[in-house]
Amino acid sequence: MTEMVRKSSGDEILNHWVLAVSCILLIISGYGFLFQTEAIGSLFGGFNTMKTVHNWVGVVFILSLLFSMRHSFKDALEYDEDDRQWFKVAGGYLSHKVKVPPMGKYNPGQKLYYLAILGAGIAIALSGFAIWLVQGNQTLILISHLVHNVSFCIFIIAVPVHIYLSTLANPGTFQIMVNGTLPLEVAKKRYPKWMKAAGKM
């Protein structure tokens, strides 16, 4: 029987799903607003209903994003020489001939992705709340729309790339989001420094 290693806790898995579903709903509805797409509006029962859904799903999203800091923020701020070497070879994604340095629990690409989503998520939430709740300050509303739209562009680029890298590009990775585990041999290959620290190497 294959020995499994736990990489994500139960609450981390649940929060990841809440974050993912709320993010996708916000991207779809946000796209509908940005381009006034009638087909998307009708999916939500009209633009007025979609606005209500968008606003409250946004509340769920930012709470989930802030909760994720409990699991990911500290790791995302820690880099060492192996991480710097990882950047030099682009993690091995551009060529299978390069030697990829040993990684810890998260590679630097994952760390930077998380920080980008965290920063853009906070920016899109604050600007969204301003658009939703602030009345009468035209300058603030204009700035908020600009910040909201720029942050939205970051999401529509970063999220599909993340989904691809977590599924097709790295088979078996999606399993972590389902049950939080992966085979020990796979963990040793992908995260040797993490496994060594855990006493499994």
Image (cartoon, grey):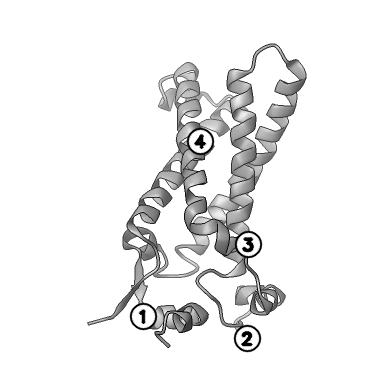
Nearer the camera: disc 2 or disc 3: 3
Question: Residue tagged by mark 1?
Answer: 184
**Farthest residue, direction bottom:** 201
Quadrant of the rendering where the N terminus is positioned: bottom left
* Left or right placement of residue 92 versus residue 69 in this view: right
Dot label at residue 26: 4
Total marks shown come to 4
* Left or right placement of residue 103 versus residue 18 in this view: right
Q: Secondary structure at mark 4?
A: helix
Whether 176 is drawn above or below 159: the answer is below
| Viewer-closest of 105 and 97 | 105
Q: Quadrant of residue 30?
A: top right
Whether 99 is drawn above or below 15: the answer is below
| Viewer-closest of 110 and 35 | 110
Nearer the camera: disc 1 or disc 3: 3
Quick one: label 1 or label 2, which is nearer the N terminus? 2
**Farthest residue, direction top:** 136
Residue drawn 51% across the image and 31% down it: 29
